[in-house]
């Protein structure tokens, strides 16, 4: 490219993709580089809710809840196939933390803040009615239940739809590109070199501004950029205090409702979220130092035990059910003095020598985060016109009865897939099949290999990598029955 880019976005989770999309919609010249697959970080291990966050009302965060409810409504219009309304049941037990009147007030406020954009309104249910809705709930001491609506999304596929929209508006997106060097360029611009970690080629990007949207890794990226752009300077103090959240995935445990439950062990809120034919049960909250070490992403047996024990208390009939899979990810929470469970889900944009870091936030508010980031950058990129966003539908994922070969072709041609894991884990739910994707892995290596020109060795490596990635998780889950 002869002219420098307006911005180079580092990180292809929902935050970076939202920024690249909004920049492209506003005719900025933007490239996004992601060092793994799109949504391979936190954006594929969320609780899958596009929500205002009912529990944040308790902490008085009305602004955050209102903003997220506005975004929930927009995303429901933009991706109806990937974000569907669900009813959530909140059972209340005698002696519990929350009185029924308080829950009723909270639900009323939640619907009020959603306003005309709201989903089906809340209701209160008597114990018998609650058990009719969800018979597997613990019946003893059940006092009442609240019922309200939120959206459940496919987090990875929604992120990919945002990426496709960004590309359709002119953004360029490169996955498996890792930044390896950065230098100050002419007239306050930057030059960033990225290595394609799959084919080893190097690519240089000249840009007016860099956006660091690397989620839980944003402090590591700040350190890298600070050392590269201002050698000898002190490493920046961390912005984040991440926390690990783990989910267990079961075959469907409910009649289709989500459940908002209170853990007896520590009073934390946890969820059973209906997702396709499955239920996500989570989460935990384990504080992690920033930048995170590689093993910070690994769930522990204690977390699995905690979730199983709480599920057994909330739904005694499910005590013997075995989880199919376990997921863990780091919340990129802003550092604060509050206990980690109460830490703010707000976001912050900071500028350091032309590098804009966006830290914190939640999936639901990614469009608001993109807006704020680009507004903060207006001076740097010399564009001051008001930003235009769109809530037109995002590109649809492949639907209908399709073969695995067609899925592979679509994933490679339209969805930035470059490895079999990308298709198994983030463009389909094949990783949750009884064989955990082992058979499709072998077929995909052929289908993708033909399109991407893989050698026989590369095809074997892809399959071996997939099998190995299952090994740790399978080993942890294999210990579950004896440890429960
Ligand atoms: C357990 C859990 C449950 C959650 N549930 C919800 C929920 O229900 N609803 C909700 O709204 N929010 C939820 N959140 C929060 C939400 O998931 C996150 O805020 C959001 O996904 C963060 O997206 P991100 O793009 O900032 O980070 P990520 O998705 O982690 O993306 C960062 C990307 O940067 C890449 N990267 C790292 N370093 C570099 C580099 N040097 N160069 C290039 N790329 C790099 C990584 O590979 C990664 O893909 C949850 C979070 C967790 C952990």
Image (cartoon, rainbow, N blue to C red):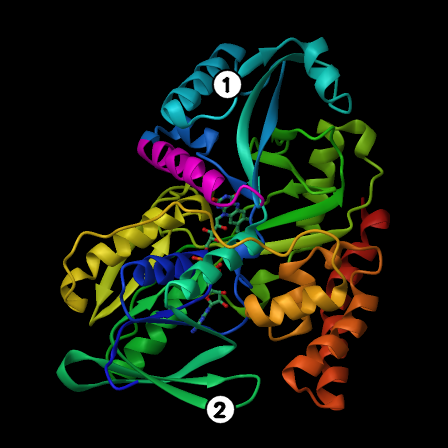
Q: Residue at x 57, y 12 (%)?
A: 124
Residue drawn at x 50%, y 17% as measured from the top left:
103
How far across and down, in percent of the image, does residue 230 sit? 23, 81
* Residue wearing tag 1: 121
352 left or right, relative to 128: left
Q: Badge 2: few (under 14), some or many (20 or more) residues near its Cα, within 10 Å? A: few
- Residue 64 shown in magenta: yes
| One can see residue 51 in this view | yes
Please state the total of marks drawn on the protein image.
Answer: 2
* Disc 2 CB within 8 Å of nearest ligand 1 atom: no
Q: Is residue 165 left or right of residue 412?
A: left
Q: Does 470 appear above or below 84? A: below
Residue 374 rendering spot, x and y as whole percentages:
25, 58
Observer-nearest of 284 and 28: 28
Left or right: 253 in relation to 362: right
| Magenta region includes residue 365 | no
**Please, what secondary structure does the residue beneath circle 1 have?**
loop
Q: Which residues are magenta?
A: 63-81
Can you tell which mark lies on residue 201?
Answer: 2
Q: What's the CA distance linking mark 2 and mark 1?
A: 54 Å
Of mark 2 and mark 1, the one earlier in the sequence is: 1
Residue 13 visible here: no
Q: Local crowd at mark 1 within 10 Å, few (<14), some, or many (≥20)?
A: some
Q: Nearer the viewer, residue 50 or 361?
A: 50
Quick check: 414 left or right of 483? left
- Quadrant, the N terminus: bottom left
Q: Whole-percent x and y of residue 377?
A: 21, 62
Residue 14 position by quadrant: bottom left
């Amino acid at each position: 490219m002869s002219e420098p880019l307006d911005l180079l976005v580092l990180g292809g989770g929902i935050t970076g993709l939202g920024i690249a999309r909004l920049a492209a919609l506003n005719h900025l010249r933007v490239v996004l580089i992601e060092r793994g697959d799109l949504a391979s970080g936190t954006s594929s291990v969320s609780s899958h809710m596009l929500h205002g966050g009912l529990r944040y009302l308790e902490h008085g965060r009305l602004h955050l809840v209102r903003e997220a409810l506005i975004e929930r409504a927009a995303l429901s219009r933009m991706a109806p196939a990937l974000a569907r309304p669900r009813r959530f049941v909140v059972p209340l037990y005698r002696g519990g933390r929350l009185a029924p009147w308080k829950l009723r007030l909270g639900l009323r406020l939640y619907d009020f803040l959603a306003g005309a954009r709201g989903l089906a309104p809340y209701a209160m249910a008597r114990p018998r009615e609650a058990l009719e809705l969800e018979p597997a709930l613990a019946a003893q001491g059940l006092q009442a239940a609240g019922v309200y609506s939120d959206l459940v999304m496919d987090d990875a596929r929604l992120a990919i739809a945002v990426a496709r929209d960004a590309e359709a508006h002119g953004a360029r997106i490169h996955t498996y590109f890792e930044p390896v060097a950065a230098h100050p360029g002419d007239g306050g611009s930057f030059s960033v070199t990225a290595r394609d970690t799959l084919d080893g080629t190097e690519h240089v990007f000249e840009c007016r501004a860099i956006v660091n949207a690397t989620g839980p890794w944003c402090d590591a990226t700040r350190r890298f950029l600070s050392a590269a752009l201002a050698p000898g300077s002190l490493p920046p103090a961390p912005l984040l205090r991440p926390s690990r959240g783990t989910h267990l995935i079961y075959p469907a445990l409910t009649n289709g409702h989500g459940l908002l439950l209170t853990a007896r062990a520590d009073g934390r809120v946890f969820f059973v979220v209906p997702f396709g034919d499955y239920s996500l049960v989570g989460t935990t909250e384990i504080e992690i130092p920033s930048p995170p070490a590689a093993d910070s992403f690994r769930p522990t047996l204690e977390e699995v035990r905690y979730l199983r024990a709480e599920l057994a208390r909330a739904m005694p009939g499910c005590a013997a059910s075995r989880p199919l899979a376990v997921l863990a990810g780091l919340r990129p929470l802003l550092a604060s003095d509050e206990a980690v469970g109460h830490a703010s889900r707000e976001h912050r944009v900071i500028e350091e020598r032309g590098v804009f870091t966006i830290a914190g936030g939640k999936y639901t508010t990614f469009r608001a985060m993109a807006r704020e980031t680009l507004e903060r950058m207006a001076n740097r990129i010399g564009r001051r016109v008001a930003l235009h966003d769109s809530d037109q539908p995002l590109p649809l994922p492949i639907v209908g009865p399709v073969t695995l070969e067609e899925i592979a072709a679509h994933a490679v041609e339209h969805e930035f897939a470059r490895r079999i894991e990308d298709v198994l884990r983030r463009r389909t739910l094949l990783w949750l099949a009884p064989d955990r994707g082992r058979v499709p892995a072998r077929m995909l290596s052929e289908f993708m290999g033909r399109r991407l020109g893989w050698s026989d060795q590369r095809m074997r490596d892809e399959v071996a990598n997939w099998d190995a990635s299952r090994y740790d998780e399978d080993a942890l889950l294999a210990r579950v029955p004896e440890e429960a």
